[in-house]
Image (cartoon, rainbow, N blue to C red):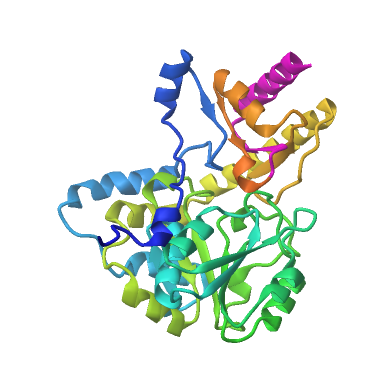
Amino acid sequence: MKKLVRQEIEDLIPYPPGKPIEELERELGISGSIKLASNENPLGPSPNAVSAILNEVPNLNRYPDGSGFYLKSKLSERYGLPPEQIILGNGSNELIELIIRTFLSPGEQVIQPFPTFLVYEKVVLGAGCEVHSVPLFNFKIDLNAILRAITSKTKLIFLNNPNNPTGLAITKQDMADFLRSVPDDILVLLDEAYIEFVSDEGLANGLQLINEFPMLIVCRTFSKLYGLAGLRVGYGFSSKILINYMNRVRQPFNVNSLAQVAAIAALDDQAFINKTMLLVKEGLAYLYENLDQMGLEYIPTQTNFFLIKIPQGGEKIYQLMQKKGLIIRSMDNYGLPDYIRINVGLQEENERFLNSLKSVLGSLN
């Protein structure tokens, strides 16, 4: 009898989706929950994006622009790259899948740091390729260890910069040295989902590296800074030849009409961008100060999220906090069982998180 699916698919474990907040509240008999688990923008979407969406609604009987002409033109103007070096995706997740489908053959190898964004491994294994994970060193991506891990089967290297879940990033010099050391027949995917939050000017930025390294692909998203996670719109930069190959695989209407007009509007919403950046800066300072007073260790971040060490175990705290209406992220799946991850929320959400954490930790003593 023929197998229903490939063995690679049989072996995959589905990505565990979180329950809707409303369902969680119903099960636990609580209300007024807040979510600090998915690194989302607590301010909501860009107001300019919302206005653009409402204006576009009457046109939903039409297919979206399959080329993303206006959005790519806006990105081209903003970042100084020709449109031929830009590709759009249904979130940056789709771009990750496109890269695998376009460039990898079954049996070829991908190298990733670990822990990092969990989707990488899932996509690679589902395509029948191999994943070699290189442990972090002091919570940082170990570039030298990645170089040593390269074999004749290596086709692609994933770098999440800043890295999720650690929030740490690679310096400009280290990144350039690394890329110059990678063999010229190996692709490097630089996932910059959180690059806009980086405050250290000495850290790497893929836009500054594209022209020197033709095998580099940079992915970004409108989900975080711009508050458009629900619309699923991402974009990527690379050499014209790599973008051309990816466009051969890409579905023609992969980014919907509402996402395209919202992204264009969000790029110009500087007031919202400034408000978000200030909220994250002030929120991190407030959370750090209070965690210091509580005697808890944490990893200072270059993003809108960070790790907190919980001696009693992250999963236990996650469960207890959930009962108080606080949805955070346990790090067991990332190989960090002593940690939780939270993103910066509104000031009242940050205060509630700290008060709830104090209460939960106190109940365990």
60 is higher (above) or lower (below) than 234: above
Q: Is residue 257 above or below residue 57?
A: below
**Residue 304 belongs to the span the image colors magenta:** no
Q: Nearer the viewer, residue 334 or 225?
A: 334
Left or right of 145: which side holds 117? Answer: left
Give residue 265's quadrant in the image: bottom left
**Residue 346 among magenta residues:** yes
Image quarter in which the C terminus is found: top right
List x then y, in percent, for residue 284.
71, 39
Q: Position of residue 225 (x, y in %)?
A: 54, 49
Which residue appears farthest toward the left when viewing the image? 61
Residue depicted at x 39% and y 57%: 9
Is residue 179 placed above or below 253 in the rendered structure? below
Residue 266 visible in the snapshot: yes
What's the residue at 55%, 73% (across, down)? 109
Q: Considering only vertical position in the picture, is 31 above or below 347?
A: above
User: Quick check: can you spot residue 83?
Assistant: no
Q: Position of residue 279 (x, y in %)?
A: 63, 39
Count how many numbered circles sit on residues in the image. Answer: 0
Q: Residue at x 67, y 78 (%)?
A: 179
Q: Main secondary structure of the magenta part?
A: helix
The quadrant holding residue 1 is bottom left
Q: Which residues are magenta?
A: 336-365
Q: Residue 197: horizontal and vertical position, in percent? A: 63, 52
